[in-house]
Amino acid sequence: MELGTYGQQHLWSSDKAIEALPPACRSVLSSMNKVGVDVLREKLVIISLSDLEIAHDEVQVLMNIYKDTDRSKLERPYEVVWVPIVDRTAPWNEANENTFNRLAAEMPWYSLHHPSLLEPVVWRYIKEAWHFEKNPSLVVLDNQGRVVCPNALHMILIWGATAYPFSSTREESLWKEETWRLEFLVMILIP
């Protein structure tokens, strides 16, 4: 199994799946760098799940946190992987391809090499076990691959990089430490 590269770093499943794609898609994919899943070993992994209609603001918030963490440490203790979830029954068209390529290019983290390469069993698992429907979510896995937070999106929106290691336990402790005051409520309501 391989991953892609930075900014346009893409995960994918197999060469056979790529061979099954239309020639135009294959040429775009072959021009992108790929890296192995080893880049995720021993790291916390945040799996960013969304469809292709993810709001620019949501991407921007995660990008800011990602870049803040980048500046504060020599090596980031976690990696983000975008897994775009698309309707498998709808035909894949040029507009979808352009949207996917634009989003993948905007994001400074890893992404699935192409949405069509997500195995059906994985797609079903994401829908059933992680309850993905349409709204973006951030599933956090520890360095052993265990889910430590089923959706860290709100935690990260509220506390940013302070929420690291983005676990449910960390979120509980942040809420216990927080003093409820007007400024905090306004910050949540008007980011």
Image: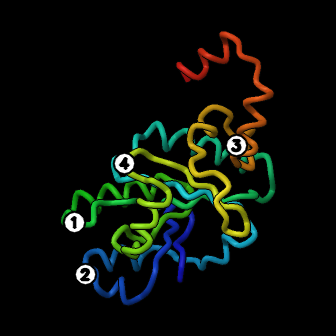
* Picture layout, residue 61 above or below residue 91: above
Expressed as whole percent of the image width and height from the top left, the position of residue 170 reads: 75, 43
| Residue to which mark 3 is pinned | 68
Tag 1 near tag 4, CB within 8 Å: no
Helix or strand or loop: what does disc 4 sit on? loop
Mark 4 crowd level (few <14, some 14–19, many ≥20, 10 Å Cα): some
Q: Image quadrant of residue 127?
A: bottom left
Q: Amino acid at mark 2?
A: Pro
Q: Image quadrant of residue 184?
A: top right
Expressed as whole percent of the image width and height from the top left, the position of residue 120 reads: 36, 74
The structure's colour scheme is rainbow
Tag 2 near tag 3, CB within 8 Å: no
Q: How far apart are the two marked residues, 1 and 4, measured between alpha carbons?
A: 15 Å
Q: How far apart are the two marked residues, 2 and 3, measured between alpha carbons?
A: 39 Å
| Residue to which mark 1 is pinned | 89
Q: Is residue 189 left or right of residue 74?
A: left
Q: Residue furthest top?
A: 182
Pick the quarter of the image with the C terminus: top right
In percent of the image, x 29 and y 58: which residue is there? 98
Which callout, 1 or 2, points to the residue nearer the camera? 1
In percent of the image, x 42 and y 76: which residue is there? 31
Helix or strand or loop: what does disc 2 sit on? helix
Which callout, 4 or 3, points to the residue nearer the camera? 4
Tag 1 near tag 2, CB within 8 Å: no
Q: Which comes sooner in the sequence, label 3 or label 1?
A: 3
| Residue to which mark 4 is pinned | 134
Q: Which comes sooner in the sequence, label 4 or label 2?
A: 2
Q: How far apart are the two marked residues, 3 and 1, measured between alpha carbons?
A: 39 Å
Mark 1 crowd level (few <14, some 14–19, many ≥20, 10 Å Cα): few
Helix or strand or loop: what does disc 1 sit on? loop
Expressed as whole percent of the image width and height from the top left, the position of residue 38 reads: 67, 77
